[in-house]
């Protein structure tokens, strides 16, 4: 078997070995909790490590460190953003807007809020997955307290125009939440120029450890604490601080260089060109303009075959990718993201997501294209779909 | 030919036969004979492709009354 090629970086990324090394002392020697800072030296050191990591993460977004609250990951950050603001506005405003293609942690939080009496508008996207900022403006009412969109979609990589959506929200004094879990470190997010009020980020998608993320909360944003039991994280999120995780997250962000994004973008272009030109009947899903797409995302459908077979056969050739088909979960419904874009079931079931990171190498692209061509051609020979 | 492991996926459609075949292959010791028994036509074609990709040995394929059996050596 040849060396495995991992192209499922929108699901999770390899933890950088330097990140693991940076974390180890916080398990073995410096294991005190940061809230012991008023009692003993190890507690002070833990607090310093936590705050240093916080400053690195805040710095990459041009934010004040005290506006960054560590969480257990992107899912918790998204839950806190939606439920925390909803509860802060309870009895005053009752309407929020989320796009139809947001991550399930936003979508399911919005659906849960509906059951609690809030009203939710699920904003449409076009056939490339874009939200129209003017559509959002038209949906805002005097009862709207929050708009939530995803910076880059987890399946298609489509990048929303968060600057324009932010402007529309600000004019109506509506809070704006961005799920930036997949764009942190890959695409600059300057909160000085794009004044989002809440931003979710995740460690394991940027070569940090799993189990840690953060929510940026702009100062003076109305948000209700959601997890109780202590006064941690500026009294916004109770629970013993994950110092080792935060240190790893900070280290992962610190290791990022602009040239990583450029290298990933070059591989994205080569992979897309190879698949589109080398395999007849291949269509791109998501933004066609690569400058409006996550640099590491290539999502295509191969006509006349189903995605799960492609994924299994690529796996057997040592290549890890995923499909938008839901057959593996025994659900009959294909990807809700693809369906929101107006795709047919066949196209949604046939979608394959290749997602790259700085740990991929340019020489892997040819093997992935050639293996995909072999698999697609073989599956089409036996496909009942003509 | 004696089967060491029988994977019965009759009535199942893609991708279940392939998934179950892979699980059996991962658990089996080298040299063991695995028989996949099913009814889905596309899977009958697909499993030999997987056998090739995984570097396994396809021993034989037989079919009676719409039920096929694929014999693989791990």
Image (spheres, coloured by chain):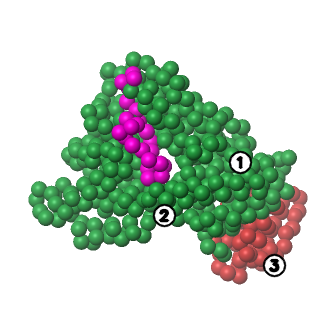
Badge 1 is on which residue? Answer: A301
Badge 3 is on which residue? Answer: B1
Residue A181: x and y in percent read 45, 48
Residue A98: x and y in percent read 48, 32
Name the tint of chain B in the rendering: red
- What is the number of the mark on residue A312? none
Nearer the observer, A294 or A6: A294
Q: Chain of mark 2?
A: A
Badge 2 is on which residue? Answer: A14
Q: Quadrant of the C terminus of chain B?
A: bottom right
Which element type, helix, strand or loop, lies under badge 3? loop
The chain assigned the colour green in the figure is: A
Which element type, helix, strand or loop, lies under badge 1? strand
- Which residue does the image show at 55% across and 51% down from the upper left? A295
Nearer the observer, A345 or B7: A345
Magenta-highlighted stretch: main secondary structure? loop
Q: Quadrant of the N terminus of chain B?
A: bottom right
- Which residue does the image show at 45% across and 21% down from the upper left? A140
Which element type, helix, strand or loop, lies under badge 2? loop
Q: Is residue A302 above or below residue B34?
A: above
Is residue A97 in view from this perspective?
yes
Residue A106: x and y in percent read 46, 38
The magenta span reads: A171-195
State yes or no: residue A91 in magenta. Answer: no
Name the outermost residue toward the top: A142
Are discs 3 and 1 located on one and the same chain?
no
Nearer the observer, B72 or A58: A58
């Amino acid at each position: 078997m040849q060396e495995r090629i991992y192209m499922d970086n929108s699901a999770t990324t390899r933890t950088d070995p330097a990140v693991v090394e940076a974390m180890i002392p916080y398990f073995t020697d410096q294991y005190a909790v940061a809230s012991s800072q008023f009692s003993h030296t190890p507690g002070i050191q833990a607090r310093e490590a936590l705050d240093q990591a916080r400053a690195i993460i805040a710095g990459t977004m041009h934010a004040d460190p005290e506006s960054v609250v560590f969480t257990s990951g992107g899912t918790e950050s998204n839950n806190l953003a939606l439920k925390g603001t909803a509860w802060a506005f309870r009895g005053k405003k009752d309407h929020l807007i989320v796009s139809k293609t947001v991550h399930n942690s936003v979508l399911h939080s919005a659906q849960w809020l509906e059951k609690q009496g809030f009203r939710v508008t699920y904003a449409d996207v076009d056939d490339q997955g874009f939200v129209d900022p003017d559509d959002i403006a038209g949906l805002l009412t005097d009862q709207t307290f929050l708009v939530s969109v995803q910076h880059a979609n987890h399946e298609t990589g489509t990048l929303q125009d968060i600057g324009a959506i932010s402007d529309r929200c600000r004019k109506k004094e509506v809070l704006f939440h961005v799920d930036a879990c997949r764009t942190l470190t890959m695409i600059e997010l300057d909160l000085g120029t794009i004044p989002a009020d809440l931003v979710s980020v995740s460690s394991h998608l940027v070569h940090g450890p799993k189990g840690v993320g953060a929510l940026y909360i702009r100062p003076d944003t109305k948000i209700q604490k959601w997890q109780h039991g202590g006064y941690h994280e500026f009294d916004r999120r109770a629970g013993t601080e994950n110092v080792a995780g935060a240190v790893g997250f900070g280290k992962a962000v610190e290791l990022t260089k602009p040239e990583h994004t450029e290298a990933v973008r070059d591989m994205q272009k080569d992979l897309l060109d190879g698949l589109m030109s080398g395999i007849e009947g291949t269509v791109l899903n998501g933004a066609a303009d690569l400058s409006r797409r996550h640099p590491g995302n290539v999502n295509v459908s191969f006509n006349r075959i189903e995605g799960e077979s492609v994924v299994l056969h690529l796996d057997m050739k040592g290549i890890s990718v995923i499909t938008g088909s839901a057959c593996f979960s025994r659900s009959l419904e294909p990807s809700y993201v693809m369906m929101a874009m107006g795709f047919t079931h066949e196209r949604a079931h046939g979608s394959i997501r290749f997602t790259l990171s700085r740990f991929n190498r340019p020489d892997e692209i040819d093997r992935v294209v050639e293996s995909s061509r072999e698999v697609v051609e073989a599956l089409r020979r036996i496909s009942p779909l003509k | 030919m004696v089967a060491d492991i029988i994977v019965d996926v009759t009535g199942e459609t893609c991708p279940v036969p392939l998934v179950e075949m892979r699980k059996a292959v991962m658990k089996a010791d080298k040299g063991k004979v695995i028989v996949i028994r099913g009814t889905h036509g596309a899977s009958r074609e697909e499993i030999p492709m997987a056998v090739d990709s995984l570097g396994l040995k396809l021993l034989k394929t037989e079919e009676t009354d719409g039920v096929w059996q694929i014999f693989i050596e791990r």
